Every structure is written in structure tokens, then in C-alpha cells.
Amino acid sequence: MTEFLKAITGRVLILGGAMGTLLQERGLSPGGCPEEMNRNAPDTVIGIHAEYAEAGADILIANSFGGNRVKLANYNLGNAVDELNRRAVALARKAAPAGVFVGGSVGPTGRFVEPVGDAGFDEMIDIFAEQISSLAGAGADLISFQSFLDIRELRAGVIACRDVCSLPVIAQMTFDDGGRTVLGTPPSAAAVTLDALRVDVIGANCGLGIDGIHDVLAEMRQVTPRPLIAQANVGLPTHRNGQTMFPATPEEMTAYNERLISLGVRVVSGCCGTTPRHIRVMRDAFNNYPQDWCPPPRRGFLSSRSGVAEFGVETPCALIGERINPTGKKGYTEELRAGKTTYIRREAAAQVAAGADLLDLNCGAPGVDEAAALERAVYAASGASPAPLVIDTSDPIALEKALKAADGKVLINSVSGEASSLARVLPLARRYGAALIGLTLDEDGIPGTAEGRVAVARRIHHAVLSAGLHEQDLVIDCLTLTVSAEQKRALETLRTLRLVRDQLGLATALGVSNISFGLPSRPVLSSVFFAMALEAGLKVAIINPMDKRIMDAYRSAMVILGHDLLAENYIADYADRAMPAQPVVG
């Protein structure tokens, strides 16, 4: 654990305030490049840092916010990335007293990532890696991402940071007064995605005053145990005599201190309009409060650009829509070969409307470029629905392509207990921040007993933890076998569900409809098996949400198992449905 991470466990740290507004007051010409002042006016930059340090800042943020080659190219400085970023860290370090940390500031490029914009994901990783390598090489203590609007761009930045250094990472997005980023990401989805990428401190800056930032962080706290950062504007800006004014007083900026501490905010500062005076008042005010904080327990979440879904041992069963799969679907297969996505968009929307929480995407068919098709499928499904995605492929190239295309934290379907499978998939899950379905089979096939499958699950669990992933991001597929061929093993599957839950404490999954393959009236058998599996502890079900019997079994089971309190969802679904008249007996 670094000294910075040790420090935030014991107390709230104050981060130096706005740099750009003070540079403008002290010589930066309108439209000028702030980072060029690291070269042309170093004493001015040092002076601002020194004022923040004297006011009580624990962290000084280097003047490198726009230090990527895309932004610097606007000033014909695209070839000065290394020089200007290294100077930024050196100037902050020169002003920092002993014990004060120096953070490298990383801001957005001004471009959007495909498919919203024209920047490739790998291109964006390369842009950020160049800047962060210079900041880390110059001796920064941490990296601070600020003011991001596009979660995909921020994903690329964090991945780049993890690729080139091991410094602690702060990551912040900017939200509007509607509680979303410009591209529609709510605080909960941002927090789930960033948590999965192992960001050390998550939060929000700019855009809102302290009351709005508090509400954003309260939503983030519902989905992540990570420490939080609050960096509000000094009130909402107003315009007077042609100047932008930030009206909040230093005292108003500290009004939420006690509530921020209770949320687990461990770093506090101000954004636009903040001065050393604001920082001094913040420092003094926080000293008046106990600053102990215990992180909440970790839970399992997935995210898209605009939505979040929870799964886990204690939650109701999450439903994965299975219909975006070419098996037995000639029309969909033809669309995949033609590079079209009409079926995907239609089915994504329809399955979510029918009750699916997650969407499985499978593009594996003869004659299909699976990697290209899966990338298109991710874009199409993400545009048609807010549901998080399940990436269903055994091709590691296609898997990585899909992980790059995703907006949030996805579920990989799947990894097995085979050593080769674990070696291929676990590094991808860690790098791109994904959860996993683990199949209870290995080099010897599917064990015939529940105990054998649990042994495979235990090995997968150990490998996941060894790879630095959280157990809350692992779902064990206990494997549904066709009852017409292997009737006795259906009960072993149900036993496996219970044993994985009770012995390993892990969430479980099943592909429900496999049970009835080859038999008539499949929905009848599948729905009964589904109800039995839910009672046995099933927590993630791959189902057809358009199947009425399956959904009837699910909604009924949620009432009986106590997940649908007061049967509110059941009543909402069935109150207006006319039941067929029952024959009179006797």
C-alpha cells in the first residue's frame, strides 16, 4: 500500500484547488495553453502551488490537465508532451512541503471514442499512456483523472494508467444537474465501471455545487465500497459585467462536511472558482470532525453506459436474455454474415421489455468473422437498451474486441476449470474490469457428481482470487444437462447449486432451457426445473424472457422466496390479466 492510500484510511485529505482560473488571473492569455506556462512562467505555477500548500492542501495537482498530445496539438505543442508533463510534476514538487503528495492531472482529449466519435479505443489508450508515462516518470505520487464526460474515454485512460505504472488512481466524471454526464451515464454506472477497473478513489468534479456533488456521491456509495472524492465548483457560475463568477463562500463549501465523511469521502477539494482561501477554510473545518470510516461490504454489480444490474448470493435471481444467439436462427445467422445488426437491436429492446436484466451476446456461426460481429453486437445492443451485457464467446480475440467495445462492466460467458481457459480469460477480465461465469468442467469434462463440480468451482474460485479479482465478480455455472439423455444428473445439478452456495458462498448460474432439449412441450419442463433451481439458490439464469411459462415461474418464485415483498411486482404484472374461466366440478 502506498503512502497516499495509507493516508486516506486515517483521515480526509484536502486537494489543492483550481489551477486554470488562477493562471488566467496571473498572466495566461485568453485562449492560451495552461501547460505551456510550465515552460514560460514556472514561477507563477510554483507560486499557485505554494499558496495551496500554505493553506493546508495535502495534495498538489500538477498543471498537466490538458497535457495529452491531442489537446497540446491545438497549440502546436503536440511534440512537447513529455517535457510539459515532466515540468508540471517538477514544479508542483518544488512547492510541496514534506508530506504533501503530488498528483499528475489527466483530463479528457476533447474527442469521443467510437461509436460516438471517431477515436479508436486502442488509439485513446496510446494517447493517455504517453502522458501518464511522463507524469509517472517525473515522480508523481498518484494520477488524477478529472472532468471526464465519456465513460469509454475514461475507461481507456484508466487501462492505460494500469498498463504503464502502479500509481494510485483517482477518477472523476462531471455530471449535470439532472444527475447524468453529457453522454447519459449516471453516477451509479460510472462507479461500477471504475470500481471494476480498480480505481482507488472514485468521485465527481466540476459541473455542480457541493449540494449536487453530495447527491452524486450518495448514489455512487450504493454500488461501490471504494473511497470517494468530492470536488465541487464554488457554487453554480453566474455572469456579471462579462465575467464568470462563482458565488459560494468558503463557509458554504464546508456545509456538507459531516455528510461527506459519512459517505466515505476521503479526498475533498473545490473545482472552478476555488482559491487558497477556500482550501484553508476546508482544512480547518474538517479538523473539527471525527474522520474514521469503515468501507461497506462489496457486492456484485454490472454496468452499461446508462444502467446497472446487481447479482449475488443475497439478491434475487438476475435474468439473462438468451435470444441473441445464432443457434437455430437462420435469419440472425444471415444478418451476422452480412454485417447487419437489425435483429440484435430488436431483440435487445424486446427482451429487456419482457423482463431481462442482462443481455447475452453470441455471434459464433460458420462463415462469420466473430470478432468483428461481436464488436458490432456490443455497439448495437448498447444503443438499443440500458441493460449490461454478457459476452458469450470461446474466442479470446473476439472476447477482447468486445471488452474494448463495451461501455461498462460486462459478464464474460465463460471460463472453465481448464488451465488453458483460466490463463486466457482471467487476464482479460482483470485488464478490462469484467465479471465471470465459471463453468464446472475441466480437462476431464463435466464431473458426474455435485461434489466433483464443486471441486472444479473451488479451483476456479482460487484462480480468480489469485488473479486479483473479487469473488463477488464470479458466478459458478453448475451446468444444466439434458434430462432426456441424463435424467439422474438433473438432481446433481440442483445439489451443486446448494453446495456452491453453502460451501463456497458464491452466486450460481444455469442455462435453464438446456434441461428440456429433445422433449416435447419444452416450456412446461423448463419452467418446473427453473422453479426448483430458484429454490435451490440459483442467482443468475440464462432464459428466454419471451417464454410466458418461464416468466410465470420466475415471478411466482420471487414471491414465495421472499424477494418480492408484499408481492408488489407480482400484483403489478398480473392484476390486470384476465384468467381463463375454471370448469365447475361436481
Image: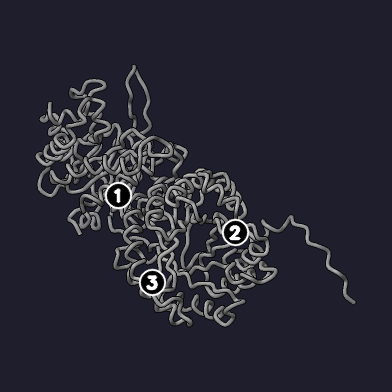
Q: Mark 1 and mark 3: span between their CA atoms?
A: 27 Å
The numbered disc on residue 328 is 2
Q: Camera-side residue: 393 or 161?
A: 393
Q: Mark 1 and mark 2: span between their CA atoms?
A: 38 Å
Work out whether mark 1 precedes mark 3 in sequence or the reverse, and give the earlier one. Answer: 1
Left or right of 165 in this view: 311: right
Q: Camera-side residue: 389 or 500?
A: 389
User: Secondary structure beneath disc 2?
Assistant: loop
Q: Residue at x 38, y 63 (%)?
A: 297
Q: Residue at x 33, y 49 (%)?
A: 202
User: Secondary structure beneath disc 3?
Assistant: loop
Q: Camera-side residue: 283 or 501?
A: 501
Q: Residue at x 60, y 55 (%)?
A: 329
Percent coordinates x, y for residue 463 in the rendering:
32, 69
Q: Quadrant of residue 174?
A: top left
Work out whether mark 1 precedes mark 2 in sequence or the reverse, and give the earlier one. Answer: 1
What residue sits right under mark 1 in the picture?
Answer: 159
Which three-letter amino acid code belongs to the residue tagged 2?
Answer: Gly
User: Secondary structure beneath disc 1?
Assistant: helix
The numbered disc on residue 417 is 3
Circle 1 packing at 10 Å, graded few (<14), some (14-19), many (20+), is: many
Of marks 3 and 2, the one in the foreground = 2
